[in-house]
Image (spheres, rainbow, N blue to C red):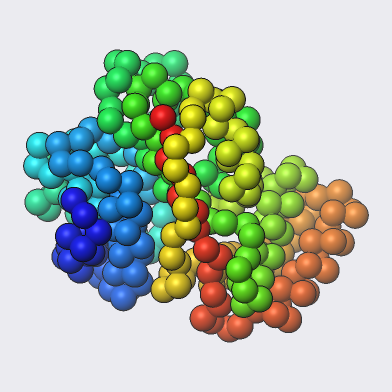
Amino acid sequence: MNHSDLQAKALSLAAGMAAADHSPDIQLSQTRHRAALVANWHIARGSTVLELGCGQGDMTAVLAEAVGPKGRVVAVDVAEPSYGAPVTLGESAARLAAGPLGPRIDFRFGTNVLDPSVDFPEGAFDHVVLAHCSWYFASLGQLRDTLARVRPWARRLCFTEWDLTPTSGDQLAHLLAVLIQGQIEAAGSHGEGNVRTPFSREGLLRLLPEAGWTTDGSGSADTEDLQDGDWEIAACLDLAGTEERLAALPEPVRQIVLSQADVLRAIARRRGNRALAAYSVTAR
């Protein structure tokens, strides 16, 4: 399915998401972003796809549309169905399962592919997809082990994540929010935020050969209409104001986190902060 075909479907795909009941415009922009990614990955009709870190299914819905009625998407997440707000993962999955894309999707929550009990036949999937979920891993080692674990199962990797290198000054607030959260996690104060192990595009490219993958494509993805900059800034400032999380930090780290949070408050807008760009990598 080409770019224009998927983009034409974005409105109906977004409308089918449970989160659209709360924020239809936000859901549409998130769906359009993922439609552009999938179109550029050239995922053919009839393909089988393993999606890791599916969350509420923003990418899952687009993948299910791309593979068509004869394709299949196995959507996996370590989180339980009760996770998420204002819509839980389970609620969003139930909405998708009840719609026209439902027969093409197999949701598996509470599933860690590093668990030996989770297994698939060699070459079971045409593609394995990780979309904006890799910073959620506890460490780069855990991500490397996961990529190595799925290597025999899939012929091709399709990966996208935020790019730590800003292209303009109005992305610095998003960058700072990400780095602060990463520092807090790295210093041993662990939480359940979306940002736990931020790493660069170059970091991923160094990691892939260690996991048995050979990069065959890389590019940038437009994020102009996405709201993630605002979300991560708010999450970071909430975290920096949480005494319990900060108390677990070594005192020098706590002080530098507090100082960086002061800078973030000074440079961030109340809303409308520009998100970092994203990058896309494919590998075999």
Give me the residue at 71% from left, 73% from top.
Answer: 264
Q: Is residue 236 above or below residue 127?
A: below
Q: Where in the figure is residue 218, as x and y percent of width and height?
A: 47, 47
Farthest bottom residue in view: 270
Q: Left or right of 173: which side holds 161?
A: left
Farthest front residue in view: 216
Give me the residue at 73% from left, 52% from top.
Answer: 184
Farthest right residue in view: 252
Q: Nearer the viewer, residue 154 or 226?
A: 154
Q: Left or right of 49: which side holds 144?
A: right
| Residue 198 in view, yes or no | yes
Q: Where in the figure is residue 15, as x and y percent of width and height?
A: 20, 66
Could you say which quadrant of the image residue 175 lies in? bottom right
Q: Is residue 249 above or below residue 261?
A: above
Give me the residue at 78% from left, 67% from top.
Answer: 260
Could you say which quadrant of the image residue 266 lies in? bottom right
Q: Quadrant of the C terminus?
A: top left
| Residue 105 in view, yes or no | no
Give me the residue at 29% from left, 16% from top.
Answer: 121
Q: Where in the figure is residue 153, as x and y percent of width and height?
A: 35, 22
Q: Where in the figure is residue 221, as x and y percent of width and height?
A: 44, 60
Q: Nearer the viewer, residue 166 or 140?
A: 166
Could you say which quadrant of the image residue 48 lies in? top left
